[in-house]
Amino acid sequence: MAKYVKYTGSLALVTSFWALLFAKCFGLEFLVRIYSAPVNTVFYVWCLSIGMATTATMLYLNQNQGTLSFLRSKYSLLPIAAAGLGAYGLLTNATSVYRSNFSFALMAIAISGSYFLLMRERDLAYSRIAIVGWIAGGLTLLLTGPPYSLLLISILFFAFSAIPALMLHFHQRDQIERAIRALGED
């Protein structure tokens, strides 16, 4: 009887793609504001990107029977709250520098909290680096004015969310491959 394990994907990969999406959106928002381009970023950057990414994520999770487990997990609340704070910060960025930078800093602290919860399950070095990076970024966001706070958030999403999530995905995949090889040797 052949033994096999089907690799169904990883939520870390989905997290990495969402972090890249937010890095792209915040980066484009920065460029539009710095060059005063006449582009409706709410529709052409944010709504289209998040709408397509939500559809793709739901299809991916549904294909891999992970939708309900992700939505019921305790880790889905903090990233959703962080995204809400980021959206609020983006909306208030044009009107009040203090309020938007404060909400961006809260978003960074909430994201570092989600990495702290992840680290409680698996103490991995890149989780610690992500926690320190997001906290330092949150403190820096309090001192950074618009539109450069948008660039800083873009960099934070890429460096301290996308890269660590990809590393976690490859770490999980390597563990699964080692377990499959160990089953084959039995």
Image (cartoon, rainbow, N blue to C red):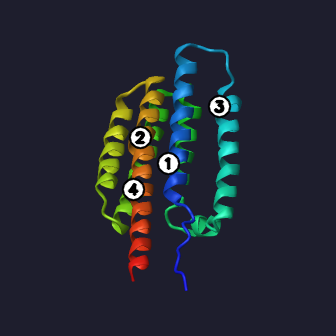
Question: What amino acid is labelled 1 in the image?
Answer: Ser
Residue type marked 4:
Tyr
Q: Residue furthest bottom?
A: 1
Whole-number angstrom distance, CA of label 2 to CA of label 4? 16 Å
Q: Is residue 79 in sight in this rendering?
A: no
Specify the quadrant of the image occupied by residue 46: top right
Q: Earlier in the sequence, mark 1 or mark 3?
A: 1
Residue hosting label 1: 16
Q: Which residue is mark 3?
A: 45
Tag on residue 66? none
Q: Quadrant of the C terminus?
A: bottom left
Task: Compare residues 66 and 157 and report the one nearer the observer.
Answer: 66
Q: Pointers 2 and 3 in contact (CB under 8 A)?
A: no
Res 35 → quadrant:
top right
Marks 2 and 3 sit apart, C-alpha to C-alpha, by: 22 Å
Q: Nearer the viewer, mark 2 or mark 3?
A: 3
Q: How packed is label 4: few (under 14 Cα within 10 Å), some, or many (20 or more)?
A: many
Q: Which residue carries the number 4 mark?
A: 115
Who's the residue at 35% across and 66% down the image? 122
Of the numbered discs 4 and 1, the one sitting upstream in the chain is 1
Q: Nearer the viewer, mark 1 or mark 3?
A: 1
